[in-house]
Image (spheres, helix red, strand yellow):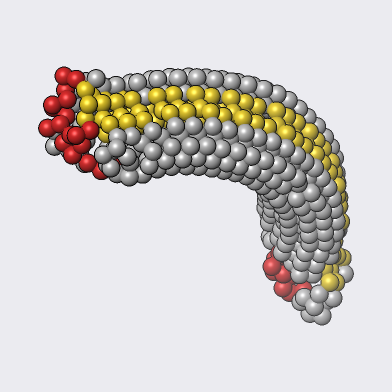
């Protein structure tokens, strides 16, 4: 039986038709095949002039196709849950509102050629939809095609904006065409595991995680993109090539990807974790980059060549554990933050002519580092070069402060030069067992254990030093003498176990010691050595509480 639109508009009630009606055809395009009783249908027909889809509760499991040649807008949720709907055609429609076809699990054919806007979740979870073509559409809203498992092609030649999660979890999506698109928001193509290549020639704005876990993605073309945002290509393990010549900033875009070469000629800032864990990355070139963020290249195990001619700041952990990196040359860098090159076990050359500050552990455990050049550096922070076993020379003509453990256990360090250094902190050169001669003409303070266990040390020059910390030169077994013309304080055990030590020159009227053990294990304690003080202060030293233990060895000069 057929019901045309005049019956609907007249609100006709079909009360005398038998109850075993099997099919109702309405000329607007709705087909119903069910055991539905006509009296149930007649009860709702009168409302259809106000809401064409009022009968959803009755028909949603039975409609297989729908066609309407006049409708301009598909309202919200109009076909939501119509699980049997297979095909729709709306040749005059220009707008699809939110959730219009949400959970239409059987929908496989869509013809809406004039559609300009697709609302949020409009086709979400339409699991049999394989191909979509919207030649006039300019806006795809949030999660519009979310979870369309079998969707493989998306054709949108005029689309200007793709909203959050629009194609998220379209696992079979392999071909996308968006030549006009300017805006792609967060997670737009997230988890599209079959997507291999993407070209967005006019896109300038990208949200976070746009291609998150697109595990088959290999190439991306973004000629107008300004910023590559956080997690943009996260876990795109097969990604090998990205072209973004106008990009000025990179967030944590490439973390965990398979990219092997990075060239970004316009990039100014590299953000935190930008290339972290890119194990295939071998070479990077950033001719205009001025700042490298925290952990930017951390754990890039195959990175061997870097070029940053304009970089002024390197963030903490920036190149941590880049175990293949051999040379670090940054001609304009002024600040290296903590752990920046730590555990770069192949690094043998570090050249930083403008660097002023070296952060804590910046080169810690760079076990192959042999040469460093820092002519402008003023501050070396704690453990900066600790455990650099092959470092043989340290020349720092402008350095004023050396932090704790700065060169700890640099076992073959033989030559150091710090002509401007005023402060050497605790453990700074402990276990530098090859160090023989030290000249620190401006040093005023020597921390505890500063040169302890420097077994080869024979000569140390400290003309202005006024404070020597505990164990400062402990176990320097080859040190025989020292001159301290400005010293006013010597800490306990300062020369302990310096077995060859036999002579000390004190130049001040009152050099304080709080314990007689400063010479424990030296020849002075065995009455074989001498303590020289200014002649006018000999009696003072001989009567001083702790110096008096050595009164027979105190000699005036």
Front residue of this view, candidates 324 and 458: 458
- Residue 438 drawn at (x, y percent): 45, 27
| Horizontal arrangement in the rendering, residue 305 relative to residue 429 (left or right) | right
Q: In which quarter of the image is residue 109?
A: bottom right
* Left or right: 66 as drawn, with respect to 140: right
The image quadrant that residue 317 belongs to is top right
- Percent position (x, y) of residue 77? 68, 56
Q: Residue 5, can we see it?
A: no
Q: Which of 492 and 424 is in front in this view?
A: 492
The outermost residue toward the front is: 528
Residue beneath the point at 73% across and 29% down: 285
Pick the quarter of the image with the N terminus: bottom right
Residue 405 appears left or right of 339: left
Q: Where is residue 484 in the image (x, y as percent from the top left)?
A: 31, 25
Foreground residue among 255 and 396: 396
Q: Is residue 285 left or right of residue 498?
A: right
Q: In percent of the image, x 80 and y 39: which residue is there?
A: 241
- Return the x and y of residue 359 as percentages of the image width and height: 49, 34
């Amino acid at each position: 039986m057929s019901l045309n639109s005049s019956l609907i508009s007249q609100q006709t009630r079909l009360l005398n038709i038998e109850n075993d009606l099997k099919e109702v055809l309405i000329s607007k395009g709705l087909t119903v095949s069910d055991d539905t009783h006509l009296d149930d249908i007649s009860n709702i027909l009168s409302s259809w002039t106000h809401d064409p889809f009022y009968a959803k509760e009755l028909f949603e499991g039975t409609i297989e196709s729908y066609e309407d040649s006049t409708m301009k807008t598909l309202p919200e949720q109009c076909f939501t849950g119509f699980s049997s709907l297979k095909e729709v055609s709306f040749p005059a429609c220009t707008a699809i509102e939110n959730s219009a076809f949400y959970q239409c699990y059987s929908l496989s054919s869509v013809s809406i050629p004039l559609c300009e806007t697709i609302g949020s979740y409009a086709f979400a979870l339409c699991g049999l939809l394989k191909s979509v073509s919207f030649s006039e559409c300019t806006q795809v809203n949030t999660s519009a095609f979310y979870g369309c498992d079998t969707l493989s092609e998306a054709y949108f030649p005029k689309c200007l904006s793709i909203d959050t999660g629009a194609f998220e979890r379209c696992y079979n999506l392999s071909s996308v065409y968006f030549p006009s698109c300017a805006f792609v928001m967060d997670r737009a193509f997230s988890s599209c595991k079959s997507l291999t290549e993407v070209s967005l020639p006019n896109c300038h704005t990208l949200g976070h995680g746009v291609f998150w876990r697109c595990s088959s993605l290999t190439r991306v073309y973004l000629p107008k993109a300004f910023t590559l945002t956080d997690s943009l290509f996260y876990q795109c393990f097969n990604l090998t090539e990205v072209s973004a010549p106008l990009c000025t900033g990179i967030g944590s875009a490439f973390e965990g990807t398979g990219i092997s070469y990075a060239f970004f000629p316009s990039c100014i800032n590299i953000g935190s974790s930008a290339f972290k864990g890119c194990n295939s990355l071998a070479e990077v070139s950033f001719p205009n980059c001025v700042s490298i963020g925290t952990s930017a290249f951390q754990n890039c195990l195959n990175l061997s060549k870097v070029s940053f001619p304009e970089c002024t700041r390197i963030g903490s952990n920036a190149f941590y554990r880049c175990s293949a990196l051999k040379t670090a040359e940054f001609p304009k860098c002024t600040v290296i933050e903590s752990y920046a090159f730590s555990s770069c076990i192949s690094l043998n050359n570090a050249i930083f002519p403008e660097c002023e500050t070296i952060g804590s552990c910046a080169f810690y455990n760079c076990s192959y580092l042999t040469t460093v050049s820092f002519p402008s550096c003023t501050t070396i922070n704690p453990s900066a070069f600790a455990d650099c076993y092959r470092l043989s020379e340290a020349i720092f003509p402008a350095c004023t402060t050396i932090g704790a453990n700065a060169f700890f256990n640099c076992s073959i360090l033989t030559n150091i030069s710090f002509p401007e250094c005023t402060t050497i902190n605790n453990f700074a050169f402990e276990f530098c067992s090859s160090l023989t001669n030290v000249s620190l003409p401006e040093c005023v303070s020597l921390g505890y254990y500063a040169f302890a266990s420097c077994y080869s040390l024979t000569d140390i020059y400290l003309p202005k030093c006024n404070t020597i910390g505990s164990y400062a030169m402990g176990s320097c077994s080859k040190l025989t003498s020292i001159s301290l013309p400005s010293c006013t304080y010597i800490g306990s055990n300062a020369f302990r176990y310096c077995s060859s030590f036999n002579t000390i020159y004190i130049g001040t009227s009152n050099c304080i010691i709080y314990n007689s053990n400063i010479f424990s294990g030296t020849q002075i304690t065995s009455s074989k050595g001498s303590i020289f003080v200014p002649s006018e202060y000999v009696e003072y030293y001989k009567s001083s509480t702790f110096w008096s233990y050595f009164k027979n060895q105190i000699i005036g000069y």
